[in-house]
Amino acid sequence: MLTVHHTPAITPTIRTPREIETDLLIFPVFEHDTLKDEPDLDTASGGEIAAALARREVTGKAYDVFLTTLRGWKSPRVMLVGAGSRTAFTADVLRRAAVAAGLAARARGVTRVALIHRSETSVPPERAAQALAEGAVLSSFDAASYKTADATRVWLTDVQLRVGPQSAGVDAAIERGRVLGECTNLARAMANEPSNRLTPRLFADRAQAVAKDAGLSVEVFDEKRIAELKMGLLLGVARGSAEPPRVIILRHEPKTGAKGPVLGLVGKGITFDTGGISIKPADNMDKMKDDMSGGAAVLCAMAAISRLGAPVRCIGVIPLTENMPGGSAIKPGDVLTSAEGKTVEVLNTDAEGRLILGDAVWYARQLGATHLVDVATLTGACVVALGKYASGLFGRPDAWRDRVRQASERAGDRTWPMPLFDDYFDLFKSEIADFANTGGRAGGAITGALFIKQFAADLPWVHIDIAGTAWAEDAKPYQPKGPTGVGVRTLAELALDGEAWGKL
Ligand code: BES
Ligand code: MN
Ligand code: ZN
């Protein structure tokens, strides 16, 4: 596989824009902006900027870009990137503007840029530094990983950030942004891999490499160990495939050795979902190579958590298998016994994610998790409910769900709360077993979540359905088509905030 992402060197600078040595200076520009607070910029552009503002070629519309040359400054060129209205400006907009500018720079063959945080905005320097660093790294990703003609590919190599006065807080924020961006790109690269290049065993190999790099402890359970643990739901799904299943366990211990809460992160790792015997239609089935995006999000979030030294203990559990219709595959009506002992009638073999998550969530509890979050490309119904721009957020108690929501806001991963009324659970009635694995079409995202809830006992638990958000179907200036790495930054931000929610 070719290199698909590249992390540039990112350094803070306190030089004035005129003195910054780079190939392209990048300024956000707002609606109704005059840029009067950036002295001599228009003069250096030979009046091009004022002219572009006057003819409304530059309006500040979010993520539009405009380039022109500069004379007498150390940078030969400048890019104005739209940042929308000043009153609606947030770190999220700034991150997106940085991605849009980075992508536009790369498209023009530029490798060295400097991003300027405008003064007089409501985003403080540290938030800006993190958002800009994240955006710069996120823009250095390319999904065309198996194209053999790679000559035109350009990566950002040097990024300078001018956010305000120098401080330890700004340095730490840049590091946070760089690591979060890099780990998001790692998850995007994994989700992008076709299923023949990322089987459960190959995923486990990568997890070992990622964990070693990040200083995480890692264990990989093979099919024998999984059988000893009696994970009948995972083994049931794996029966249809020639590839054996795996379970990955990752552990992060904070430096302080603090007791306190244990965050259990569980990610769906279906490396390909054919639907099994309840087989999916051929159209778009190729998309089901990304059905391990939740698993990749947990792995890469754990890497970020370790590299950034999050203050809480964290455990990652990733159940991995293909969902295939082989000769030994489970069939509709089959009854499986979960590791916990609950029996499940499999009415639809395409509802496989909840099965493997059932055993994995139970196992996270056995390992001592006190707070649970699972991330999964779980249901088409969630895509119907929320579309492609927000993940479904389910969980209890509300206080825990709201913490995860806040983490997702900081991360720029949008989530939206969905209900979990018990009434929906009646849909899972089985004549033969404790319950069935599907609840019909109505409220499909909710019933999927309620199935997983059965395995969380009484722990604070949240489920994030990323079926709609893991893969971008339409290119946007701030989000190219392809894998998004959704969930990585949410989980990492949650762990970094552990001291605050640990008392819940
Ligand atoms: N991996 C799919 C969910 C999915 C669908 C993700 C579309 C991304 C885009 C999941 O395993 C699945 O097949 N779910 C079924 C559940 C149903 C059989 C109860 C679905 O959504 O149709
Ligand atoms: Mn499925
Ligand atoms: Zn699936």
Image (spheres, rainbow, N blue to C red):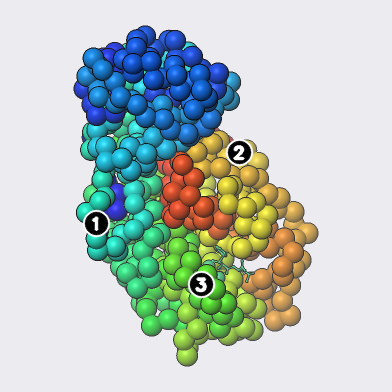
> Which residue is rendered at x = 26% and y = 50% of the image?
153
Looking at the image, which is closer to me, 355 or 349? 349
Amino acid type, label 3: Met
Note whether 336 is above or below 151 in the view shown.
below
Work out how far the residue at label 2 is from the one at label 3, CA to CA, in angstroms: 34 Å
Residue 72: image x %, image y %? 23, 14
Q: Nearer the viewer, mark 1 or mark 3?
A: 1
Give the mark nearest the N terminus, 2 or 3. 3
Which residue position holds label 1?
150
Residue 99: image x %, image y %? 40, 38
Which residue position holds label 2?
402
Which residue position holds label 3?
285
Q: Which image quadrant: the C terminus?
A: top right
> Which residue is rendered at x = 34% and y = 67% of the image?
198
Note whether 268 is above or below 301 in the view shown.
below
Amino acid type, label 2: Asp
